[in-house]
Image (cartoon, helix red, strand yellow):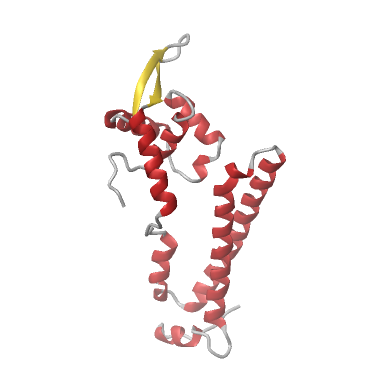
Amino acid sequence: MKRRQVANLLALAVLGYLSQGPMHPYELSKTLRNNGDARSIRFTHGSLYMVVQQLAKAGFVAEQETSRAGARPERTVYAITDAGRAELRDWLRELVGEPQHEYPAFVSALSLVAALPPDEVVALLHERESALDGLRAETAALIERAEAEGVPALFLIEEVYRLRLIDAERAFVAEFIGRITDPQQGWGPMWAAAHGTEFETK
């Protein structure tokens, strides 16, 4: 994995949108939110301005003009440079083509889950199932609504990917519950014994 001058994924989104045309940070923020990018990339107005400044320092974007409308503060419009366009394409090639090791919070919790008694874990996993069902319904509705509005499927592909991840996690959680609660070979009794309790699920 290549070390990048500006490694924040928000920078990737900024370069992506500036490749479509010059914008000022406020317009970038509005575009990111309107296009649903806040579902994939965390950012605030302040962090966006900081990333734009970092990209400018790296030579990936450049000030194009500064304007003021009425009593509003000055707004500087930024444009992507040739170096920025090359960085955008190289970064995307890396992210699309090379799997990367990530550190999701749920994986960290699973590595330590035996510290909780199994009956509590089963109850928590059922809560997670319900939450995942809600997320799935929300994501599916977003896709359906966007398709009805004529948004091309290509521009919804990250939501389709999110849907597949939810489905995979939902299946894993159901399987994990089964491994704990199976009447013949379930882990529940042994796990509960380690906590000095008996295994009980409702």
Give the percent coordinates (x, y) of residue 3. 27, 47
Residue sitting nearer the eye, 51 or 57: 57
Residue sitting nearer the eye, 38 or 109: 38
Give the percent coordinates (x, y) of residue 89. 40, 40
Q: Is residue 39 above or below residue 168?
A: above
| Total residue callouts | 0
Residue at screen point 42% across, 26% down: 25
User: Quarter-wise, where is residue 58 in the image?
Assistant: top left
Q: Is residue 77 above or below residue 100?
A: above
Residue sitting nearer the eye, 28 or 125: 28
Residue at screen point 47% across, 32% down: 17
Quick one: which residue is furthest to the top in this view? 70
Residue at screen point 63% across, 44% down: 153
Q: Is residue 172 above or below residue 13?
A: below
Residue sitting nearer the eye, 20 or 166: 20
Quick one: which residue is furthest to the bottom in this view? 184
Looking at the image, residue 151 sits to the left or right of residue 52; the answer is: right
Is the C terminus in the top left, top right, bottom left or bottom right quadrant? Answer: bottom right
Give the percent coordinates (x, y) of residue 169. 54, 64
Give the percent coordinates (x, y) of residue 95. 41, 50
Quick one: which residue is furthest to the right in this view? 148
Residue at screen point 49% across, 46% down: 40
